[in-house]
Image (spheres, helix red, strand yellow):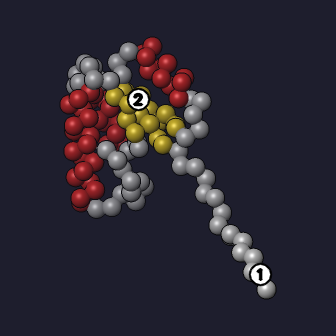
Amino acid sequence: MAQMCFSTTVASPPQVARLLIANDHALITEGLRTMLSGEEAIEVIAEANDGRQALTLCRKLRPDLVLMDVRMPVRDGLEATKKIKQEGSDERRDGDDARNPRLPL
């Protein structure tokens, strides 16, 4: 007698990546936001005008992804990225991140 197997797993909804855009040129930022608004898997949660603001927003909002311009006033994108990555690594070592355990900074 043949047996039939049915899968009872339910597909989970796709995960949305929360994105912070850091760029000091408003036209570029608006263009990126417009392009990404059509992507179902990406949600732009904030915009920063310089590296210092990007760092502050990352600490507050904890985005999954950061799209960072390299040359910006106040704190450049490379310096801000190093600091964001360092702080993300420190947090993962100190304890788990209940909101987002896959923080890939």
Residue 5, image x and y in percent?
71, 75
Element on which disc 1 rests: loop
User: Where 105 sits versus 30, above or below?
Assistant: below
Element on which disc 2 rests: strand
- Residue 28 or residue 10, whichever sits in front: 10
Can you tell which quarter of the image residue 28 is in? top left
> Which quadrant holds the N terminus?
bottom right
- Residue 100 or residue 60, whichever sits in front: 100
> Which quadrant holds the C terminus?
top left
Q: Which residue occupies 66% across, 63% down?
A: 10
Q: Which mark is residue 2?
A: 1
Residue 45, image x and y in percent?
47, 36
The answer to whether residue 48 is left or right of residue 85 is right
Which is more N-terminal, label 2 or label 1?
A: 1
Q: Which residue occupies 59% across, 38% down?
A: 40
Q: Which residue occupies 34% across, 28% down?
A: 68
Tag 2: amino acid: Ile
Residue named by callout 2:
21
Q: Which residue reaches farthest right?
A: 1
Residue 75, image x and y in percent?
22, 25
Q: Which residue occupies 26% across, 40% down?
A: 84
User: Where 19 sits versus 103, above or below?
Assistant: above
Tag 1: amino acid: Ala
The answer to whether residue 47 is left or right of residue 50 is right
State if disc 2 and disc 1 touch (CB < 8 Å): no
Q: Which residue reaches farthest bottom?
A: 1
Can you tell which quarter of the image residue 76 is in? top left
- Separation (CA) of disc 1 from disc 2: 56 Å
